[in-house]
Image: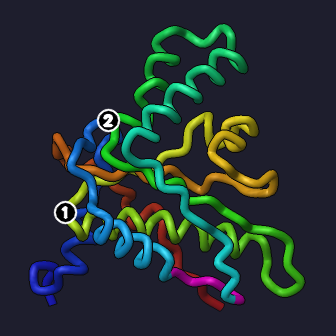
Amino acid sequence: MTDAANPTLELLSARRSVPANALAEPGPDAGQLERMLTIAARVPDHGKLAPWRFVVIEGDARKSLDLRLAALLKEVQPDAPPQRVAQQESQFSGSALVVAVVSRAAPHVKIPEWEQVLSAGAVCMNLVVAANAFGFGAQWLTGWAAYEPRALEILGLAPQEKIAGFIHIGAPTERLSDRPRPDLAEIVTRWSA
């Protein structure tokens, strides 16, 4: 079967990240977003723990978050260049919509924490693929705010939670050519006895 004969293979073969600042309005409507989040949550999840959750950042909340994080950046990094602060002032509002995927991985009697973290990563990838399937562009980012405890408080995370990724979604204003991908000869080995 050729990729063209299978839309899923065609989508996966052509998927490419679009820079967050090139993801304009319109973003997904409420029904599309609900469907995307439902698809994102269909990942391997050993023990059915759902060790992740979503924080949707949309509308005016995007700019409010940008301004609060820019103020925090100036506070925690007083020598941050003005260009970096200005960039933070449009980090989230530059995209039509942002979904923070929050990892709730925690010690468990049977389920290794690493498997829970991997499940959160799979959620991020499913969300990116779902956005592409709906015709939107997407980019999975982290950045300083994903690791700064006070930024995580602003986002409403509990102390044990972490950002697995900020998934920026919107209508692409540009389409990039594909970037070089790994040569399978360099990354594939075959185990033998």
Q: Give the left or right position of residue 70, taking residue 156 as reference.
A: left
Q: Nearer the viewer, residue 7 or 108?
A: 108
Residue 135: image tag: 1
Question: Residue 167: image x %, image y %?
Answer: 44, 53
Residue 60 is left or right of residue 85, and the answer is left
Which image quadrant: the N terminus? bottom left
Q: Amino acid at mark 1?
A: Gly
Q: Residue at x 13, y 84 (%)?
A: 2
Tell me if I can see residue 180 in this picture. Answer: no
Q: Quadrant of residue 160?
A: bottom right
Question: Taken as a whole, is the magenta stretch helix, strand or loop?
Answer: loop
Image x and y of residue 143, in percent = 56, 38
Q: Secondary structure at mark 2?
A: helix
In the displayed structure, does residue 161 sit left or right of residue 32?
A: right
Q: Is residue 15 above or below residue 177?
A: below
Residue farthest along the right direction in this orientation: 109
Q: Quadrant of residue 23?
A: top left
Determine which residue is flagged by label 2.
Answer: 21
Which of the colour schemes (rainbow, by chain, secondary structure, one colour) is used? rainbow
Q: Is residue 45 magenta?
A: yes
Q: Is residue 96 magenta?
A: no
Which amino acid type is marked by label 2?
A: Asn
Observer-nearest of 182 and 127 = 127
Asked if 19 appears above or below 40 in the picture, the reply is above
Q: Residue at x 81, y 69 (%)?
A: 106
Label 1, residues with CA under 10 Å away: few <14, some 14-19, many ≥20: few
Q: Residue at x 49, y 26 (%)?
A: 88
Q: Quadrant of residue 29?
A: bottom left
Residues in magenta, as a range: 43-47
Residue farthest toward the left in the current orientation of the protein: 4
Residue 171: x and y, percent? 21, 50
Whole-number angstrom distance, CA of label 2 to CA of label 1: 17 Å
